[in-house]
Each structure stands twice: as structure tokens, then as C-alpha cells.
Amino acid sequence: MTIRVPVQRLCSRGWVEQAIAALDADQHRSADTHLFKLECPKLSGIDIYLKDESTHPTGSLKHRLARSLFLYALCNGQIREGTAVVEASSGSTAVSEAYFARMIGVPFYAVMPRTTSREKVVAIEHYGGTCHFIDDGSTLYAEAAALARSLGGHYMDQFTFAERATDWRGNNNIAEAIFRQMEREPHPVPAWMVMSAGTGGTSATLGRYLRYKRHATRLCVADVEQSAFFDGYRTADPECRCERASLIEGVGRPRVEPSFVPGVIDRMVRVPDAASIAAMNVLSRRLGRRVGGSTGTNFFALCWLAAEMKATGRKGSLVTLICDSGERYLKTYYDPAWLAEKGLDPAPYETLVEAVLAGDGLDLPLEEA
Ligand SMILES: *Cc1c(COP(=O)(O)O)cnc(C)c1O
């Protein structure tokens, strides 16, 4: 008996192999992102490190996620030659996915809130992606799924698949890269890693890796003012919702996303938006270049932990991420008129963060779950 394999199947397998080879070769050409040490001599023995994810070709940590999601969907047989790829995104993921879609030659559509920064829209279109705007953020997921259906395409769904598309055991994921880069530091095993949550995928990868490798490092997740994650964690209720949209792009979600894994989080805090922007400003001044708002969220929580370690006489290292560059937010977080319109005053928080870094701030106001 002869088994007939449809010609179409054979062709698409060849195409899929080429697409995977293209992603693989791109990764092979890439260098790891830098792990910066922030010099804070007054913190004597508490060392701060920042993994700079703004230097990926598409400008944010979403470069890693987009590569993983494309590989996952290709290996699942969900993306074939000509498959339209659709994503629900607040911007950064769509920028990175548009880049990889162009690399393998499939059409890409981003469904996103109308409020997404102009800079990100320009970047998505630069890579040949199409932007599809919606007014009501709560319909984001349904609109993306519907668009994929109508195109006969594939809904990538980062908010569901981020946590499983990344190899959490290693394979040079962000956690493994950080530990390798820390090897020659005075405190190579960090006391804390700090991360904000958008999909929750990065914190899931960090937390699982810490447990799997049995490191003493603890994971602190920093949420923002308008977000369901913090209440979802505190009450252990995955149905928690948040009506208002987050002002900090990339982090804070209206629902507890499926990729958010609460079980791997040791501590969860909620950073006020004005404090995120204050910490963003302080860090940008210290680095001599601008970082984004969610990096400020990360850095504020990290400084809170540094102050606590200082107060209890503990020494060790603290690691967080520069998620993206501030150049994307010149008309928002870096614009005094925008801050005034949103009623945000970072100045008092800036004073507090500076005091911690100068070694004489013993506490930062922060809500802990
Ligand atoms: C997505 C994102 C985050 C959060 O990362 P997740 O892994 O999705 O939780 C933080 N900052 C920026 C700018 C992002 O785009």
C-alpha cells in the first residue's frame, strides 16, 4: 500500500525548516545584552546590576519573546508559508514580532490600543507590519482572535503563551545569561532579582530558573498602579480585574494574564506611577541615557530592597532589567506637560530614591502584598 503525502504538506515542511534556520542564524549572529553595574559606593557592599534589554535590534526585551513565540508556533505547525500572524499588543511585542515576521516572509498584524505611542506604530510599520487600532482595551484579545480567524491566520497570543514558549530550564534564556555574566562579581548569586509584569513571562522564566537551579536568589515582582496582577497575587484570585489602563507602557494588565505564574514569586509590590517615573529619571541621569517607564518600576522596587538590606546590615547583589529605552517616551514620561495632564509629580519620589542611593535613605513607601 502506498501512502500519499499531500504535496502541499511536503512543501510547507521545507518552508518551515527554512524559516527556523533563518531565526536560528539570526540568533547566532546576535551578541548577549550587556549586564551593567551601577556604581553606588555609598551602598557599601550592596551591588546593583542592570541587564540592558534596550539594545536588542528591536529595542526591548520583547525581542527574546518574539523569537521564542515564532519558533514555538513554527514547531507547532501553526505558522506555514503565507500564514498571517496576528498579535494583541501594547506595542513592544508587535514591534519585535513584525521584525521576525518580515525575516521569514509572513504578513503581520498588530491589534493594539489607540493610545500606543507613535514611535512604536512607526517601528511596526517600518518592519512591514499593519496596525489595527481599538478604542476599548478590554476587547483587545477578542479583536485579535477575530482578526486572525477572518484572515485564516494564526493568533500568536503572547499573554497566554509567553510563559511556555521560553525554555525556562536554560538554553541561554535571560536567567541563565544573567547568572553567567555575574560569575566574576563579588556576590555572584544575587540576593534578589526584580521584574515588572506585562505578560508575566519574564518573571515566570526567572522564578522557575531560580528554583530549578536551587539558587538562594529570591524573586520580587513589581506591579504598577493600574493593573490586576497585584490584587490577583494578594487574594490568590485569577479573576481579579482592573478597569483603568496602565500608564506605564508594557506593564500592568486589566486581567491576571495566563502567563503570570504567582507560585514562583517570593515578594510582590505595587509601585505608584509617579514613583516609577521618578526612578526612571534618577536611573537615566546616572546612566547618562534615557530608560523607559517600566525600567523605572523595576528600579524603584530594587531601591526599596536595597534600602531594606542596608537597614538590616545585609550585603549582596541585586539585579533587574532595562526593559526598553526612554527615547520611545519623549512625548509622555519625559514631557512635563504630559505629566501635569496625568497629575503625576515624580519630584518627591526622586528625592527618596536619591537618598537610598546616597546610602542614607532607610525606607521607601511601597505597598507589599
Ligand atoms: C513586556 C514588557 C515588560 C514586561 O515583561 P513580561 O515578560 O511581558 O512580563 C516590561 N517592560 C516593557 C517595556 C515591556 O514591553
Image (spheres, rainbow, N blue to C red):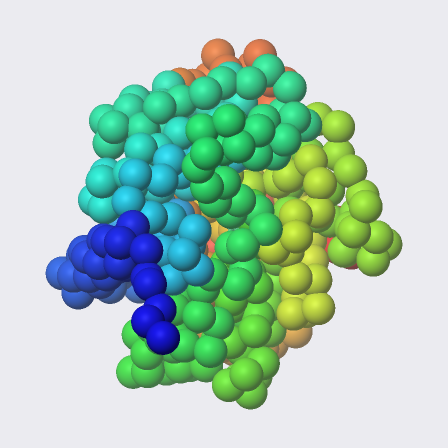
Question: Within the image, what quadrant is residue 305 found in?
Answer: bottom right
Judging depth in this view, the residue of 351 and 276 nearest the camera is 276
Q: Position of residue 66 (x, y in %)?
A: 38, 49
Which image quarter holds the N terminus?
bottom left
Residue at left offset 33%, top offset 63%: 4
Residue 271 seen in the figure: yes
**112 is higher (above) or lower (below) than 366:** above
Query: Left or right: where does residue 91 sit relative to residue 220?
Result: left
* Image point (70%, 62%), residue name: 262
Question: On the rendered image, what quadrant is the C terminus found in?
Answer: bottom right
Residue nearest the viewer, comparing 49 with 306:
49
Q: Position of residue 337 (x, y in %)?
A: 48, 12
Give the residue at the far left of this rendering.
29
Instruction: Give coordinates of residue 140: x percent, y percent.
Output: 60, 29
Query: Is the residue 248 above or below the residue 7 in the image?
Result: above
- Choose between 312 and 50: the one closer to the eye: 50
Location of residue 289 in the rendering, given as x and y in whole percent from the top left corner: 28, 40
Residue 186 or residue 254, whichever sits in front? 254
Q: Residue at x 51, y 47 (%)?
A: 158
When asked about the image quadrant of residue 153, the answer is top left
Residue 66 visible to the viewer: no
